[in-house]
Image (spheres, rainbow, N blue to C red):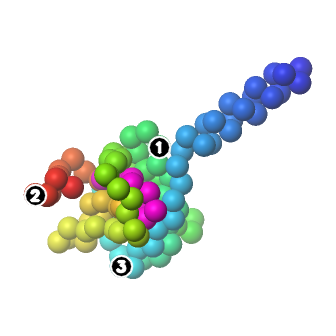
Amino acid sequence: MLKKLFVSFSTVAVMVASAATYNVTLFQNATLDGKSLSAGEYKIQINDNNVVLKHDRDVTEVAARTETADKKFAQTVVRFNAKSEVTEICIGGTNKKIVFGGEKNSNGM
């Protein structure tokens, strides 16, 4: 019985650990996958092929992919296009980059 309980807790711990969570601040209102995002603090949870952004009571889930850079980013950077749409987020202190949409810009990012 105790062994089954331990295995259950271990499984839950692995599932929670597999979803990476980061904090990011949007300094301006933006859109992401057609959804409005107001400026403020967001908690970002990276799952397999999607990202969940949480801000106050608002939860936004969008398709995204992660890429790995050659070296760590010194700070978190949110990149926008001319329409104030979030195109990517580089997570400071890691080498992870979240890319939204299927297009790459001219320098491969």
Q: Nearer the viewer, residue 50 or 96?
A: 96
Hey, what amino acid is under mark 2? Ser
Q: Is residue 11 left or right of residue 40?
A: right
Q: Residues within 10 Å of mark 2 (few under 14, many from 20)?
A: few
The answer to whether the residue labelled 3 contacts the one labelled 1, judged by CB atoms less than 8 Å apart, is no
Which quarter of the rendering shows the C terminus?
bottom left
For the magenta stretch, what is the residue range? Answer: 91-99
Q: Which residue is mark 2?
A: 106
- Classify mark 2: helix, strand or loop: loop
What residue do we see at 60% from left, 43% from top? Answer: 17
Q: Residue 29, image x and y in percent?
A: 35, 76
Q: Residue furthest left?
A: 106
The answer, for residue 33, to whether it is visible in the render is yes
Q: Which residue is mark 1?
A: 47
Mark 2–mark 1 distance (CA, rounded to whole Å): 27 Å
What residue do we see at 28% from left, 67% from top? Answer: 79
Hey, what amino acid is under mark 1? Asn
Q: Residues within 10 Å of mark 1 (few under 14, many from 20)?
A: some
- Classify mark 1: helix, strand or loop: loop
Q: Which residue is mark 3?
A: 28
Mark 3 or mark 1, earlier in chain: 3
Q: Residues within 10 Å of mark 3 (few under 14, many from 20)?
A: few
Is 94 part of what is drawn in magenta?
Answer: yes
Q: Residue 14, image x and y in percent?
A: 63, 36
